[in-house]
Amino acid sequence: MAKFSGKDTIIKYNQILGDLKNKIYKPVYVLMGDEVYYIDKLSEFIANGILPENERSFNQTVIYGKDVTEISLIADTARRFPMMSNYQVVIVREAQDIKKIEELEPYMKNPLKSTILVICYKGKTVDKRTSFYKAVVKNGEVLESVQLYENEISGWISTYIKQHGFEIEPNAAVILSDFLGTNLSRIVNELHKLFTVLPEGRKKISALDIEKNIGVSRDYNTFELSKAISNRDVLRANKICLHFGKNAKEYPFVVTVSTLFSQFSKIMKYHALRRQQLGANDVVKALGINPFFIRDYEVAARNYSMLQTAKVISLLREYDMKSKGVNYIAADNGELLRELISKIFNIDNLHYKV
C-alpha cells in the first residue's frame, strides 16, 4: 500500500468538509496525524457548524484526553440521545493522551446514529492493524493528516492565497515557506496578517511586503542563496553567507544545507529530464515547480553539469554530517557555511566518487 501523503490529506479533508457542508454526517470521525492544521479546521467546523448555537449547551460536549481515566466516559456520553435535536456532538480533544483508546472498539462497531463523535488524535496515528481502526473506517471517517514536504509548501501558500482572493509573487512564496517552515497553522496566521496590512485595493503580495510585515529579509534568505549559487554569483553568495554567519540563530546551518540539497537534487533531475527530450511543461510538472522558475533551472544546468551537480550533492551530504560533529570541529556554523560555498564554486577541484 502506498504511503499516505500530504496531498492525499488535502483531498480527504476537502471530501469530508464537503460532506459536512452538505449535511452528510457520519457517526464517528477520527482525525489523526502530525499536521494539526487540518485536524483543527475540521473539529472547529463540526463544533461551530453542526448544531445551532441555542442547542449546543444541551447537545454538545467537549472531553479532554487527560481527563479520561475510564474509556466508558466517552462511550457513555456518546450513547446519550440528543435533547430536542436531531444530533448531539461529542468532541474528544487531545485524544492521544488516552492510554487505551482502542477500548472504544465496541462503540465503534455499533455507534449511535444521532451522535457525531469526533476524536482529535494529534501528533500520532492509530494503529491501522487494530479492529478499532477497521471499525472506524467501516462506520465513520478517518482523516490521516500528514505534513507536506518542504518543497510543496510554497505551492500550498500560493493556492491558499488565491482561495482568499489574493496573489503572491512566486519568489515571495518561496521566501515565506523557507522562513516559516512546514507549520501550516503558523503560515496561515502570518498570511492573514498580510491580508489585513495590504493597502486597500491591492491584492498582490510582494517580497517587500513579507520583509516589512513578517521580518524575513527579501535579500538575505536561503532562496536568494540558492539562486546566487545556481547563477555562480560568487560575490552575492558570499555576502549572504556573511549575513547568515552574523545571524546564525535566524539561519540555522541545517536548514540552509537542506534547501541547497533540495535545489541541487532538482537540478540533477532537470538534467535527467532534458536528456529524455521532454518539453518545458512536462519538465515543470515532473519537478513540481512553478513555471516561473523554469528559467532558473535552465541557467543552473548550464552552470553545473550533471557530474558537477552530483559532486555538489555529495559535498552537501558531507557538510551536513560535519555540522553534526562527524569527523569535523568548526569554530562556528558561519565558518562551515563559507567553507562549503567556497568548495561548491570550486567543485571541479574536488574528487568525489559519484
Image (cartoon, rainbow, N blue to C red):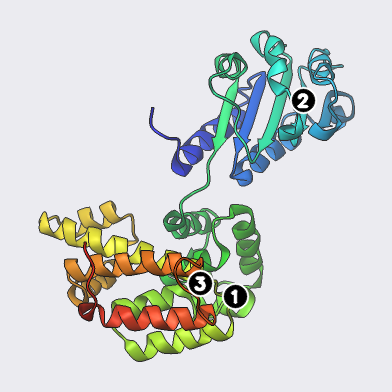
Figure label count: 3
Give coordinates of residue 300: x percent, y percent: 25, 73
Give coordinates of residue 224: x percent, y percent: 42, 78
Q: CA distance from mark 1 to mark 3?
A: 10 Å
Mark 2 residue element: strand
Q: Is residue 219 visible?
A: no
Q: Residue at x 52, y 37 (%)?
A: 14
Residue 134, placed above or below residue 202: above
Please give the residue where the numbered disc 2 appears in the rendered image: 89
Q: Residues within 10 Å of mark 1 (few under 14, many from 20)?
A: few
Q: Residues within 10 Å of mark 3 (few under 14, many from 20)?
A: many
Q: Residue furthest front?
A: 327
Give coordinates of residue 264: x percent, y percent: 31, 66
The amino acid pointed to by label 2 is Val
Position of residue 194 in the picture relative to residue 325 (left or right) = right
Q: Residue at x 23, y 75 (%)?
A: 299
Please give the residue where the numbered disc 3 appears in the rendered image: 253
Tell me the number on the disc at residue 250: 1
